[in-house]
Amino acid sequence: MTWRLRVDPIACDGRGLCAELLPECISLDDWGYPIIESPEVSGRLMTHARRAVAMCPTLALLLEDTP
Amino acid sequence: MSSGDEVPRLLRGLTSDGRPLSLTEHLALHGPVPAARARRDPDRNLVAEIERSGLRGRGGAAFPVALKLAAVGARRGRRVVVVNGCEGEPVSSKDRVLLNQSPHLVLDGATVAARAVGAAQIVVATKLDSAAVVEHAVAERVRARLDEPTPRVVVVPDRYVAGQESALVNFLNSGRSAPTLVPPRPFERGVGGQPTLIQNAETVANLALIAGNGAEWFRRLGPAADPGTVLVTLTGAVERAGLYEVARGTSISVLLQRAGGPSAPVQAFLVGGYAGSWLTAAAGREACLDEASMAARGAVVAVGAVTVLPDTACGVAETARILRYLAEESAGQCGPCVHGLASIAGSADELARGIAERDVVTRLERWAGQIAGRGACHHPDGAVRMLASALRCFSDDVAAHRSGRPCPAAPPAGSRHRRGVLR
Ligand SMILES: Cc1cc2nc3c(=O)[nH]c(=O)nc-3n(C[C@H](O)[C@H](O)[C@H](O)COP(=O)(O)O)c2cc1C
Ligand code: SF4
Ligand code: SF4
């Protein structure tokens, strides 16, 4: 199963913590809001992705399973 | 029943003084809608007829209506039909004219939609200036024992984003007119948490005509892939600005002829409203009002608005003014929309005034790329599309402005940037 990263842009406050924790998948735009560069996560990156999701202060980073 | 080969269809019988057609007048023009009562279960035959008609949505995205009807009908619950009469586009007046002058056609269509999906509730969402007419029309129908369920009229805020579908659902549920994160989409969880069909007022009026005259009749006008008519709000440098109904696929030059021609040499056209696209005069004249023809030119019919820019105006300044408007109409929720549109509007304004830095176009393009698809709704995407089309359409002017030579039509700090020629 692959998991997909998504940002809830309404909840996100753009402090950019997720890009620090998961630079493999997330970069920041010119205003500091996350751009998901590669949404599909699997294997080794899962632990990091889970941690970034758990650390997001506004619960805006979502990891969803794709059917 | 009309022969169907001619326009107007939707605007048929409208009075020149702008008053609404009464129920009696409406019935004399269009006849009664067959089987106006919704049942608990979706009407599959009706959905099949609408599918054969090929009707697409007229609220912007041109999505096939039958697919939405089927998606809502397939869901369990007390299904809801919402007629979207919010019409946030400043250069569009079609929905307001339909609701204010032919309210019964829209209400007929609402009952057709309700029957198609088996709805327990109908909501008509309008701006304040249509509400009284629609309420009155509903009362006429209640007296004549026409509809079941009886439509509820709700006044929505007069803001650009209020008509975005999740914002509309949010407003009906909580009184807050702001988009929400999707999914869940309205067909999954909409008004009152129930499966909800949202269709534009013009779309719904077409449903009434299809139910009354059949899919075959409907398809007699317009291209096979995009049949029917289009309501065009024609504004700007044209002899007779106003609302027109033409067959889809009609070229803009034929439309212009019907309106008495341009009132000044044409520089460009803005097609599809503020979230639409600029086309040069030459490209625009040839372009036809159907989605395939527009797509081939990087444009969209969307809400069908066509604005004629005279050669005395400055396209760069108009673009900057529209971007400022769209930035201010952001619902203020998503970073890329709030900050992105503000940045773009600021740079476009500097460009228009000839005081932008030399890399301004690269910067605008970079930001456009960063913003697209990153809001909770498509509001920023529309703004970015319009910007991209302006950079193509007005490329020479953009180059001149960038080297500190704004065209004569764009006075350095002039009032023109605030008050456009288009509106
Ligand atoms: C920013 C924004 C504003 C919108 N405003 C309107 C509107 O005022 N009226 C409308 O019918 N659709 C509007 N829409 C489109 C709706 O979200 C929805 O797609 C439409 O009402 C569906 O009806 P249709 O399929 O019949 O076109 C808007 C969309 C966006 C992104
Ligand atoms: S950590 Fe959460 S709130 Fe912060 S930028 Fe990332 S998604 Fe947004
Ligand atoms: S994208 Fe813009 S308009 Fe849409 S919800 Fe986000 S802030 Fe509001």
Image (tube, coloured by chain):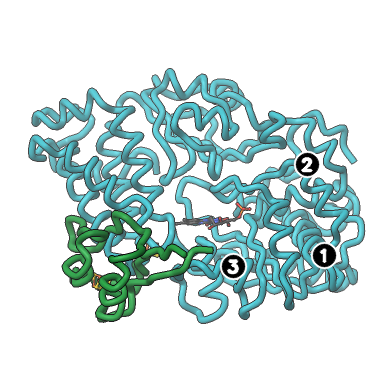
Chain colours: A green, B cyan
Chain for disc number 2:
B
Amino acid on which disc 1 is placed: Pro
User: Disc count in the image?
Assistant: 3
Label 2 to label 1: alpha-carbon separation: 18 Å
Q: Which residue is mark 3?
A: B186
Q: Which residue is mark 1?
A: B42
Q: Are marks 2 and 1 in contact (CB under 8 Å)?
A: no
Picture layout, residue B338 above or below residue B232: below
| Residue B249 marker | none
Label 2 to label 3: alpha-carbon separation: 24 Å
Percent from the top left, x then y, of residue A18?
A: 23, 70
Near-viewer residue (B224 or B125): B224
Q: Regarding ligand 3, which quadrant of the image does it lie in?
A: bottom left
Q: Which of the 4 image quadrants contains residue B398?
A: top left
Q: Looking at the rendering, in which quadrant would you find the C terminus of chain B?
A: top left
Q: Which residue is mark 2?
A: B53
10 Å neighbourhood of mark 2: few (<14), some, or many (≥20)? Answer: many
N-term mark: 2 or 3: 2
Percent from the top left, x then y, of residue A14?
A: 22, 69
Amino acid on which disc 3 is placed: Pro
N-term mark: 3 or 1: 1
B369 relative position to B190: left or right: left
Picture layout, residue B259 above or below residue B66: above
Near-viewer residue (B290 or A43): A43
Q: Are marks 2 and 3 in contact (CB under 8 Å)?
A: no
B59 relative position to B409: left or right: right
